[in-house]
Image (cartoon, rainbow, N blue to C red):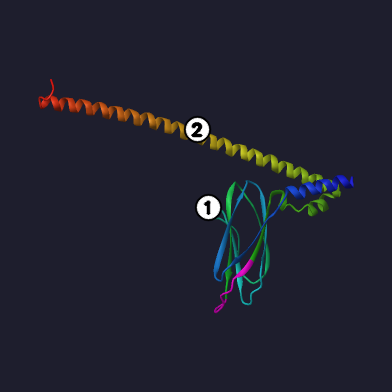
Amino acid sequence: MVHFSSTIGLLLSMAIMASGLRFNVPANQKRCLKEEIHKNLVVTGEYEISEGIGYTSSVHVTDTRGHTLYKREQFGDLKGKFAFTADEYDIFEICLTNHAPAGQNSQREFSLVMKHGVEAKNYDDIAKAEQLKPLEVELRRLEDLSDAIVKDFAFMRQREEEMRNTNESTNSRVLYLSIFSMLCLLGLAAWQVLFLRSYFKAKKLID
């Protein structure tokens, strides 16, 4: 049993990885990152900022429609967390700003770890609430991971179908445009022949 539980934990640790980034933000500037999130997914984030005397920071999370999902402005703490649930498939933007005091012009290092879906669930709390054994917790996590993979494949299949339909529609439109262009060219050529023939007849150059 112990070996089976350890194997499951190893597979999960290989399959689930949180996206972590570390970057520098100049004084009084901001850096924005974009994350593509599927519908009904829980998203969590943890940020950590290097020290700076008198410096403050701001974190702002928005969707493509401009709705604010998390906002914290000019705080002096060096660590923080945020969480939200995606109501629909969207691309979310996370902006971090480095506010410098007067006379200071130093950049600061920001660290951001994003988790979503199965990664964002706290299975320790679930185990305590439902009184689950360690093996049962790992099985629950594996089940959630399997559901997430199935949903990802279904989403990828849907996107592939949409792209195929778009390609087929584009090909049909190009075909119709080509036929229309050829008809226009043939009509123009026929008109030119008739016009030149009537012109030459009018000039009595041909019978």
Q: Quadrant of residue 23?
A: bottom right
Res 161 → quadrant = top right
Q: Is residue 145 depicted above or below 206 in this figure?
A: below
Reply above or below: 55 against 181.
below
Boundaries of the magenta span: 101-109
Residues 201 and 25: in front is 201
In the rendered view, would you say 110 is above or below 187? Answer: below
Q: Is residue 87 left or right of residue 12?
A: left
Residue 2 seen anywhere in this rendered image of the structure: yes
Q: Position of residue 112 (x, y in %)?
A: 66, 61
Q: Position of residue 68 (x, y in %)?
A: 57, 58
Q: Is residue 21 magenta?
A: no
The rendered magenta stretch, by its main secondary structure, is classed as loop
Residue placed under numbered mark 1 in the picture: 65
Q: Which quadrant of the figure has residue 101?
A: bottom right
Q: Residue at coordinates 50% horizontally, 32% vertically from top-left?
A: 168
Q: Quadrant of the C terminus?
A: top left
| Label 2 SS | helix
User: Along the horizontal axis of the image, is 133 left or right of 13?
Assistant: right
Asked if residue 73 shows in the view, the reply is no
Q: Amino acid at mark 2?
A: Glu
Residue in the image at 70% along x and 43% along y = 148
| Dot 1 amino acid type | Arg
Name the one closer to the observer, 175 or 30: 175
- The numbered disc on residue 168 is 2
Residue 103 lies in magenta, yes or no?
yes
Q: Residue lying furthest front in this view?
A: 205
At which x and y percent is residue 122?
76, 53
